[in-house]
Image (tube, rainbow, N blue to C red):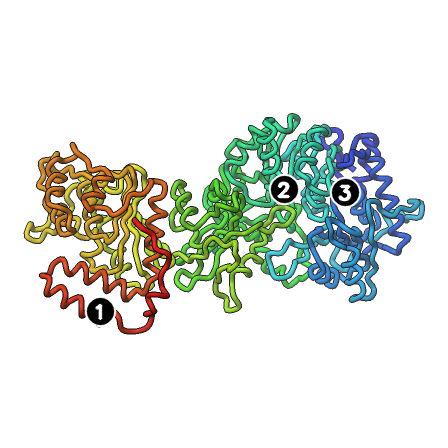
Amino acid sequence: MTTTAATATRLSTASIWELVDARARVTPDAQFAVNEHRRSFTFAEFRDLAEGVAAALYERGVRAGDVVSWQLPTTVESMALAVALTRLGAVQNPLVMMLRDKDVKFITDQLETSLLIVRSEFRGFDHAGMAARLAAARPGMDVLAVDDSMPASAPAILPPRALMSSETRFGPEISWILYTSGTTSAPKGVKHTDRTLLAASATFTDNLQTTPHDRCAALIPIGHVGGLGHLLHALEMGHTLLVGATFVPEETTDFLIEQGVTLVGSGLPFTNEYLRISHERGIAPLFPQARAVLMGGAGRPRTLHEDAKNRLGGVGIISGYGMTECPYATWGRPGDTDLQHAEFEGVPGRGGEIRVVDADGRQLPVGEVGEIRLNVPQMFKGYVDSSLDADAFDADGFFRTGDLGFLDADGCVSVTGRIKDIIVRKMENVSAREVEEVLVGDPTIADVTVIGLPDPVTGERVCALVVPVDPDTLPTLESVRDYLRTTDLNVRKFPEQVEILDVIPRNPLGKVAKNDLRKQFIDLDGQAVPDNSDTTATTTATEILEFETIEFEVADHIATITLNRPDRLNCFNETMAQDMAAAWARVRDDDDIHVAILRANGERAFCTGVDLSEGAWWAHLNRWNQEDPGIDLGPKQHRVWKPVVCAVNGMAAGGAMYFINESDIVICSEDATFFDPHANGGIVSALEPIGMLARGIPVGEVLRWALLGSDERMTADTALRAGIVTEITPTTELRERAHQLATEIAGRRPEAIQGTVRAIWEALEMNPTTALRNGLSYTQIGNQGDGRSDSRKNKRTPRFR
């Protein structure tokens, strides 16, 4: 046993049992733990409890090297069992409580478990019954079912610890085998020694700067490596654990407040509940004695740190990073900056090194995202299935985590996602975690996870699985994307499918079971399928084309084109003209598109004409070769005979009429205004008014619009009377109404709809006789083929306007 210079009571030993024994001798009467029933244990009492359990197991036949699997809730008695097995030199295999027959059978078969210890019953599940079924299928495995207490015998029967062999069939000193929570088809057994787990504990103690006065919430499952870590750092530093087998938000919160918790944990689900309670009770800080709120095991929104700091207590979030293979690889420090608390996971402990590398294994500089690789004292000793080892480590012995992230100048690591959690869309990577962290801010979403699903066009598409705040107001693809437009998330990362779930499945540490979710939405042929349950809000696959000045999406046979220069009031420049030409060509040539919606981002304007700040980009041409600068903006110039629903909000000035004049149905919001600023600038207004006349706007209205400039502006009501628009909607309902109209049209036979549009528009340039003959030919062409039906059977309850 050695001590550090920093604290006289910090202990460092070579084995866990030596640590238990040393702590009981150094601070025997100090409080080790308090459970939710308010029963308190000193370190000496804990050591004695563990020795009694060890003696009972020894009487039962457990010897050094035997494999003992155990599945128990987080109690002081379970912790005593864990250290009792180290006293006996057994190889122990902790199991989290969520595992059931299939996984427990796989694990105990692989390890050839000699004794399986389970809780008789826990949270409604018959663990004893499961254990009996497994034992019946594999003779030679003994079963011990326990309740609140553990069997105990007189420690005098125990042989000296020194006589117990450190050699096991899994390798030198291998005394712990934990299984990953399942990112692969079968759990992976991870081999650890006492030394590796103690090194993990040391990282926590060093970085968190714990003292004997700390009181740490121990709510993580004891069968998980994170739960074992709490046990070990309490023994190392001599501080107190506040132990709970189940998390009951109100009761657990009261327990932690009463006990003066200083290190609050542990994970996103816990923290969200604490924040809710703080708001509901109107108490801040909720935990007056707290030094920090511990986080780890799952991604978190960037705003969580400030919320925790303001409402829960202490410095806010201190987060750690690790996995079963490298537990507690990093931890934050109390003195880190707010940015580091909010978005980073701290630094490695003593003797640890972290690298971020590119796809070829080359180390990346600060700030660049790549794969995180670790070489730390707490690194595991390989997998039970040794065939997995070769791919686990690189040539320098660093563990390939499969996580993506970057380092800052202080060596703090930020985890941005998983290599396997990257959605490859159109040969570009989209981080699911990045999208999740933005979507948590949507006020209609209570919980969210993002997965990639196969897509025949893009390779993969982004699918958001959401739990609604209000079951009566379900988020839709449209509402989700509208929210994301208020954020800085790139449009190419927007979800293309939204599914509604009652709950997002997670393990006890908050890790989402994404593999299971993907399977739910992928059919036997490997193609994405919608969830046909009644709770599904939308199962739309959306394609997104990327442009500089517009947004273009295709879903459910509807192309949605959104002018996207709100900072310039959506005035058009040469790039927008080119973008619109490409967009209309796609609408025209893609038979999967039946109808288009044209709209604009921003609250102030639909479009305010040409962007004069960029000059006349057409002026360099010979004047006899110059074209109307707005000629590319409208659909009919591109021979688009698919209906276009135009939704006008805010100002529609001058050149905005290029869009409006060639749209088939134009609706506007209550705040829409229409005017022509040409006259104010002393410029001839000819092209837009001519288009208005062709559309049938009365000549008097057109002249008044063109001659009075911006001094007089048409209101929405005037535009309706003049025939520029056909409907006025509340501003907040404009997009929804446009989508409703487009959806109704998209459901009709496309050949008939396109023939109708073409016949009507071409008739505007013909005399009546020619127009009628032309229209007759279109009925003969467009009414052939499949898809026609009895019109009496293909109608809905009419509405009137």
Q: Residues within 10 Å of mark 1 (few under 14, many from 20)?
A: some
Characterize the local packing of mark 3: few (<14), some (14-19) or many (20 or more) Cα atoms within 10 angstroms.
Answer: many
Rendered view: 799 above or below 470: below
Query: Mark 3 is on which residue type?
Result: Thr
Which element carries disc 3, helix, strand or loop?
A: loop
Q: Residue at x 39, y 56 (%)?
A: 542
Q: Which residue is mark 3?
A: 75
**Circle 2 is placed at which residue position?**
351
Is 24 rendered above or below residue 447? above
Q: Are marks 2 and 3 in contact (CB under 8 Å)?
A: no
The mark nearer the N terminus, 1 or 2, is: 2
614 vs 581, nearest the viewer: 581
Task: Please tell me whether residue 212 is drawn above or below residue 765 in the rendered image.
Answer: above
In space, the residues marked 3 and 1 are separated at their CA atoms by 79 Å
Question: Of 369 and 527, which appears nearest the observer?
Answer: 527
What residue is drawn where x is 13% and y is 64%? Answer: 771
Q: Nearer the viewer, residue 76 or 695?
A: 695
Instruction: Inspect the image, locate mark 2, and give the three-letter code of the amino acid beneath it.
Output: Gly
Pointer 2 or 3: first along the chain? 3
Q: CA distance from mark 2 to mark 3?
A: 32 Å
Residue tagged 1: 779
Query: How many other residues sit within 10 Å of disc 2, few (<14), some (14-19) or many (≥20)?
Result: few
